[in-house]
Amino acid sequence: MKKIGFIGYGNMVRVILDGFLLSGVLKPYEVVLSTRTRSKLNDLKETYPEIEIAYDNSSIVLKSNLLFYLLENQM
């Protein structure tokens, strides 16, 4: 089974992930996600309970076939 990993859940990742999920390109069970601020994930998990939450980035790297890591607000 393919897994798409997302490190971080900022505004850009939220938009990209919503687009993938709403269009059907990705199914929730194909997503693994981590973020420093776990409270950001409450609404996401309520809408998509099948999304896997990883507790560290190394887990995402090991579980994912494709990885998204966007540097937001780094300027």
Image (cartoon, rainbow, N blue to C red):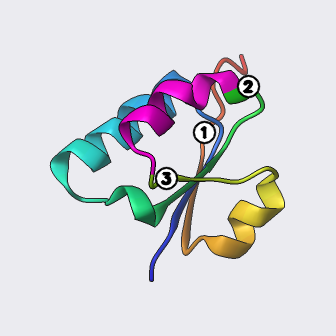
Q: CA distance from mark 1 to mark 2?
A: 16 Å
Identify the residue at image location x=47%, y=25%.
43
Numbered disc 1: secondary structure: loop
Identify the residue at image location x=42%, y=63%.
29
Magenta residues (range): 39-49
Measuring from the top left, give residue 6's x and y in whole percent.
58, 50
Mark 1 or 2, which is nearer the eye? Answer: 2
Numbered disc 3: secondary structure: loop
Give the amino acid type for the residue marked by disc 1 in the picture.
Answer: Leu
Query: Which residue matches tag 1?
Result: 70
- Magenta span includes 36: no
Residue 46: which quarter of the image? top left
Query: Which residue matches tag 3?
Result: 51
Q: How many marks?
A: 3
Using residue 74 as the reference point, say whether residue 3 is left or right of it.
left
Give the amino acid type for the residue marked by disc 2 in the picture.
Answer: Thr
User: Which of marks 1 and 3 precedes in the sequence?
Assistant: 3
Q: Nearer the viewer, residue 61 or 53?
A: 53
Q: CA distance from mark 3 to mark 1?
A: 19 Å
Measuring from the top left, give residue 22's x and y in whole percent.
21, 43
Give the amino acid type for the residue marked by disc 3 in the picture.
Answer: Ile
Q: Which mark is residue 37?
A: 2
